[in-house]
Amino acid sequence: MPKIAIDARMINHSGIGTYMQNLINALLGEYQVILLGNPSELNKHFKSDAIEIIDFQTSIYSILEQLKYPIIIPDCDLYLETHYNVPIFPIKTKKRIVIIYDMNHLAFYEKLSLAQKIYTRFMMNKAVKMSDTIITISEFSKSEIIKYLKVDPLKIKVVHFGIDPDIIKTELKKDVSLSLKMPDKYLLYVGNVKPHKNLINLLRAFEILLKSGSDYKLVVVGKKEGFITGDKAVFELVELNKLLNQNVIFTGHIKNAELYNYYRKASVFVFPSLYEGFGIPPLEAMICGCPVIASDLASIPEICGDAVLYIKALDPADIADKINQIFNDIELRGELIRMGYLQVNKFPLSKFSHNLKEVINEVINRG
């Protein structure tokens, strides 16, 4: 079997980690898989004897990782880099693939420090030049890679994320003790607290609802800290605004079974993001029978189709108005839930697995 080495240090990151878990599971049985990362973390996700794990816990984006790559990466048919921090020195592999999920860091270039700007542009260009093929997760991201990095379109392959409703339905059946008491009535936001996630305008919309007499809470699920570009303005707004302070609940990171229960019991899921390479949360909400409101930007229409109520993401009044529509129109709620179930079926895990292996085999067998 062909030998594939994969940098799996980001296995627990939201979005990237989920894509990576599905990717690795898709390769088991047909390839000899070698994972680089934290053995204790990786053993929690993968129990297969077919996986070899090499201890590699060096910080990403560091000089040390670049020095260790040539030593730690074994002889292999393919090295699969799951982020753009690719090895820049020679490594012992016949072929290389890099996965680039989006161009967020270049699209919001002004938000980076000078050091981050230099690193990001240098490494992004190295990633596309040193790899035999680039995998990305949406047609939108493909167009962004071409726009910012001037890459030959034929070098980029789109492999949409795959999602398995049965996995989520199984988690929903578990008896979970929630880390926080779930409100009786609430809106739900799931995602990291970064500026491009646009949580700030959802909060402003929520304030409009509260001032009009709404008795709903807003539950924010997701990682709050440790980002290259976090959104401090979100926490400042909540802290200084008494109305928001009393009605916004930050859960932090929670287990999947808890997350899916929050989706299932929410009155509406709001996804106001300004920039997404794919966007998994709206599909998760659809599986759980929760109506979705989302922005019409970036890849979101490509992924969500006609199954969501679209908003003007930078207009809090429009966001508040659309949320009220969901509250007050039972037929609209029912139609969004019905369309959501259909939309999810467009991204089966089997299709993801097939398309991924097709790209990998083509690269390995290329002369």
Image: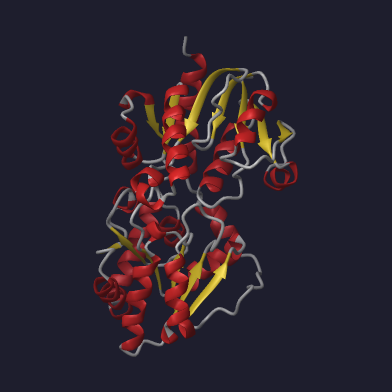
Between 49 and 146, the one lying in front of the other is 146
Across and down, in percent, residue 137 comes to 41, 40
Residue furthest to the front in view is 114
User: In this view, which residue lies farthest toward the bottom?
Assistant: 213
Q: Nearer the viewer, residue 8 or 340?
A: 8
| Snapshot colouring | secondary structure
Query: Does the rendering let one see residue 266?
Result: no
Is residue 41 depicted above or below 206 in this figure?
above
- Return the residue found at the far top: 367
Q: Is residue 221 left or right of residue 311?
A: right
**Quadrant of the image containing the N terminus:** top right
Going 52% across and 55% down the picture, which residue do you hit?
227
Locate residue 44, reporting x and y percent. Answer: 71, 48
Residue at 42%, 23% (x, y): give it: 129
Residue 302 as seen in the image, left or right of residue 86: left
In depth, the one of 217 and 306 nearer the eye is 217
Q: Is residue 354 left or right of residue 28?
A: left
Classify residue 256 by image quadrant.
Answer: bottom right
Question: Above or below — where is 49 with respect to 152?
Answer: below
Residue drawn at 69 percent across, 42 percent down? 46
Q: Total of numbered circles in the picture? A: 0
In which image quadrant can residue 340 be found? Answer: bottom left
Residue 9 location, x and y as percent?
63, 41
- Relative side of 162 to 256, left or right: left
Instruction: Name which residue lies at 58% across and 19% down.
Output: 90
Query: In the image, residue 169 lies at what x, y percent?
Result: 55, 59
- Tell me if I can see residue 61 in this picture: yes
